[in-house]
Image (cartoon, grey):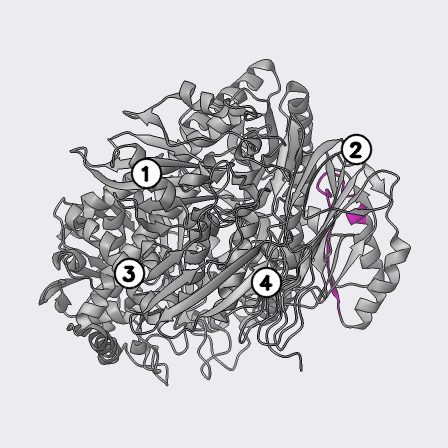
Amino acid sequence: MAGWRFAIDRGGTFTDLLAAAPDGRLQRLKLLSQSPGHYDDAVLEGMARAMHWPADRPLHEAPIDSVRLGTTVATNALLERRGARVGLLLTEGLEDLLLIGDQSRAQLFSLRQPRQYPLQSAVTGVRGRFDAQGVELTRLDLDALRPTLRDWLDQGIESLAISLLHAWRNPAHELALAELALELGFRQISVGHRLSSATRYLDRSATALIDAYLSPVLRRYTARLEAAIGPGRLLLMRSDGALVPAAELGGAAAVLSGPAGGVAACRALAESAQSQGTLIGFDMGGTSTDVCVIRAGQAARSCREVAGLPLGLPMLEVHTVAAGGGSIIDFVDGQLVVGPASAGADPGPACYGRGGPATITDANLLLGRLLPEAVPPVFGPAANAMLDRSASERVLAALGQQMRDADGQAYSAERVALGALALADQGMAQAVHGLTTARGLDPSKAVLNGFGGAAAQHLCGVAEQLGVRELLLHPYAGVLSAWGIGLSAAGEYLELPVERVLDRGLLRNLQQQRGAWLLQQQSREILPAALRLRLDGGGELDFLLPWSGGEDAAELEALRMAFAAAFAAHFGHAPPASALIVAALVLESREGQGDWPVQAGEAAAAGLPERARWHDGCQWQTLPVHAAAPSVRAIDGPALWVQSLTTLYVAPGWRLSQDEAGLLRLSHQGVAAVRPSEAAGGHIADPVRLSLYHHRFMHLAEQMGEVLQRSARSVNIRERLDYSCALFDPAGQLIANAPHMPVHLGSMGESVRAVLNSAGGTLAAGESWILNDPYRGGTHLPDITVVSACTDADGQLRALLASRAHHADVGGISPGSMPAGSRCIADEGVLIPPTRIVEGGVLDRIRLRQLFEAGDWPARDPDLNVGEVEAQLAANRRGAQLYLRLLDEHGGAEVQAYLAHVLDHTEGLLRSRLRQLHGGQVTLRNDQGAQVAVQVSIDAEQGEVTVDFNGSSAQLADNYNAPAAVVRAAVLYVLRCLLDHPVPLNEGFARPLTLRLPESSLLSPTPPAAVVAGNVETSQLITDALLLAFGVQAGSQGTMNNLSFGTAQWQYYETIAGGAGAGPGFAGCSGRQTHMTNSRITDAEVLERRFPLRLEHFGLRRGSGGRGRYAGGDGVIRRIRFLEGVSLSVLAGRRMTAPPGLAGGEAGQRGESRLQLPGAEPQTLAYAEQRSVPADSVVEIRTPGGGGYGDVG
């Protein structure tokens, strides 16, 4: 006789379960994942309840055929840091790789950065190395490692992660180490190249570490489950969508185990509907919302970051936003906020009856979009009570009282709830929007499929934000991820790294690899093969294209044409003439797909009312309540549809129908529902709309940045993220920025206003301008700014969009345009005054190219410059499209009003903060002996600040002069850090500010002064001086440690992390970018693959942070060997002076730059130096530590 079959999704708040009885009946259950005092494990409890299994009989005696499970056990262990003790083996010289990461800081405007808490308990470097082609450079010495590994075992470290540089190309050393570890007795051995095909060392190393950290935890959990249910019954969902036996699932492959089930369900829905369009999965649970995209029946796979570490595994692509039914509603600094904190399962929302806070679930319950009678009674102290609507009303009314106390306006519980739902809908819609537009898809033309416990209440609202007009709701929507897990198949998904030029010889080689793999698949279904192709030298963006398996000339040409079509669809123009690189070969097979028939029309528990109270946004009314049935006529909103574990809110303007399979379809009828946020008008700012518009404007800028990064070709933009995007009002006032580069953000406004002045005060429709002039808002010449008009249908200028990006080279006396020895602006490259390059929507490519070819030292690769400008124009166009959509959806009057309200609100917050601070006076000297003197004076009564730099040095003969726009950027950055509130940097920060700069000085130079180091070096000194004057942080490294090198054929530039200063109550962060930059460091394997060099060392400079009650952060040591002669330029600071401590804390150590020529002793370089060096030369940069805070004792 057949036994029970289970498909289960164990989430963070709820555990969803589908149970198929031996007679074919299906049950759906939803339990709290944690219910202390009632059951120990929700998975086992749910199975027992479904089978009505006696509590006194062991579960393994039950007639169970199979259990398919997706679980967050691994993810939770990672987030809560409850993994195994791990020893980590990395290539010698790179032992601190996972502490430094990509060197960027997570919170751009926070002085108190989160400290790095490593997952590994111990790490050691492995001597033995391959080059980027897989040729052995240094032999592996296993005997030298044996004592260390034995010591680790003696300390109780039984989990080992192994990751070596370029092991994806040649794994011999990793395999030898794994064999040794097995011989010595390590219980868990995670090997980088076996786990991940990533061709980035950081990603692969993080994957090995996460796997070693989580696999023992996951194994313990699954062993406990198997002991309870019996062996051979349990299959687990892998993050890539395949089911595997429990013993075969490693921790790294399990971090998206549950969400992968939702993607699988959406893919099945798309297949059943034979849809070749786009289906968006919208899975809203108790803690978060997961979004996926199914295109032409296929789900994308990608790598992602988990808990701050990049995971180099192909996982079903899911974008997670911290908004769920349990997201906490709060009132903070004059704004209503939703999340990211969650009430979780315990205590849960207020309506759970355990003293929890106000949440999104409470808002839905209060407004009548969710009925207590429709939800199983599993709440309260005894886990047997219904949802408590009165508790929801109490906590929301209390928030309304807080809001009334703040501004005197009346805020009922209903008004608070409506505002919170609007914020939640917008946040989730922005997540959908970001995921779809990043793939060149228009979300308004997609179908939105809602599932999870809370999605059905928000489906219509999110759809309206996106312009989506067709929605789906499955009969199993409340447990759809479990259904997807049940449908999934066992199988294999491989991405085999290649990194070779596409030609027929390579295709023959790949054909042989595929043939060998096919022999291993036996009876599995083979899915079409694919290749990841990218441009040689065109960054890391690739396109996944189908490959027939052929190798003839026709196949080669077909691949090239497919790539050209994909490139043109993505960028809007044909790809440049360049070889194609095959990044990876993609192979997939599957077998044993599950069969879980859909049984439609299962209603919730009896006792539903026929009508229910419902708030329409203006007043209380009643709406009809429909219990699910096998067939139903069309239902027009407003209405509630209640089926097992799901309550669907059908909003006004939507029509619900049901097809033969029981699938619910909602279509928009073209009737606009009244949105409370719009109905109130825009003349008076209210907390809800302030928060909405803050997020809308910031989202716009973030979307611009996404387009720019995807479209650019250079390492500087694609890898290092050295760019910024922002929205300005028609007068050139900064409204919102994405959290990009601080030195760009506060200075771009001057460039935008310079364009307006040159254009006669306004821009016409279809106009874009370019400039890099440091005397008109620019920073230094490589930072190219593009400004574009956003005009309405009448041609009226409604906003300005600007993007600034650091180009790889704009000419000058040294490759990379960062010359150490420049003495006038002409030495640094081409200077571009405000110049119109797009008129009537048409780009003048001839004029643009001429700009980069002008002067005595023109750009070395003007074609690349033109391509980067086109990427910036694409970003600006995206911003304009989004702004026009805002005007269309919310009305020009309201949007323009909130341009002003956002600035007013920011100004008010800053004035309040300034009243709590004290000023001071500080003088800092740079390595030349020039000084930055600043006096900060605060008028507490008015909430105003005067920043006076009189007393600073006169204009310098070298290039450390900082343009006035850079000084302004540093001041605004500091004010934004002092506010410590989640608002974008905007012009409101400048209103309480009086800034005084001495003419013709270091901080306000006149042409033709050189400025390249002023932007990157003097800006850091200014920031340190200001923070010291305010008394909030000791000196940070105070430099960007600019290193550039190259030849006439190639150029490379990077800034190198250091130590952050400590402050009251916090230690400084180590090995992170500080203050005015936040660029990433290029991955070691990408660096060695793209350029003729070898990265010999990159690690923390331990002990370089200043001592104090709170210690300063440590700097880093970075050592590079050149494999061919290059022109080398170092631009740095804090080589002669040290980062100062504060309040008795000691100074951090000074930086040092060293050069060792072949056969010579190392020599110390000056703070600014340029050399032509031969092959086999070594440069070593030791970056400063941060100053300490407070007396050492």
Which secondary structure lies at badge 1? Answer: loop
View extreme (right): residue: 143
Vertical comparison of 694 with 1179: above or below: below
N-terminal of the pair, mark 3 or mark 2, is 3
Mark number displayed over residue 1175: 2
- Residue 624 is situated, as x and y percent measured from the top left of the image, at 12, 62
| Front position among marks 3 and 1 | 3
Which of the 4 quarters of the picture holds residue 255?
A: bottom right
Mark number displayed over residue 1060: 4
Gap between marks 3 and 1 measured at Cα: 25 Å
Which secondary structure lies at badge 2? Answer: loop
Badge 4 local density, few (<14 within 10 Å), some, or many (20+)? many
Residue under label 3, please give it.
Answer: 691
Residue under label 1, please give it.
Answer: 442
| Front position among marks 3 and 4 | 4
Q: Do the residues labelled 2 and 4 touch (CB within 8 Å)?
A: no
Vertical comparison of 890 with 559: above or below: below
Magenta segment, which residues?
157-175
Q: Is residue 474 visible?
A: no
Amino acid residing under circle 2 = Ala
- Residue 147 is situated, as x and y percent measured from the top left of the image, at 88, 64
Amino acid residing under circle 3 = Ser
Gap between marks 1 and 2 measured at Cα: 50 Å
Mark number displayed over residue 887: none
Residue 166 lies in the magenta-colored region: yes
Gap between marks 2 and 4 measured at Cα: 34 Å
Badge 1 local density, few (<14 within 10 Å), some, or many (20+)? some
Residue visible at 73% across and 56% down?
95
Amino acid residing under circle 1 = Asp
Q: Can residue 1028 be seen in this view?
A: yes
N-terminal of the pair, mark 2 or mark 4, is 4
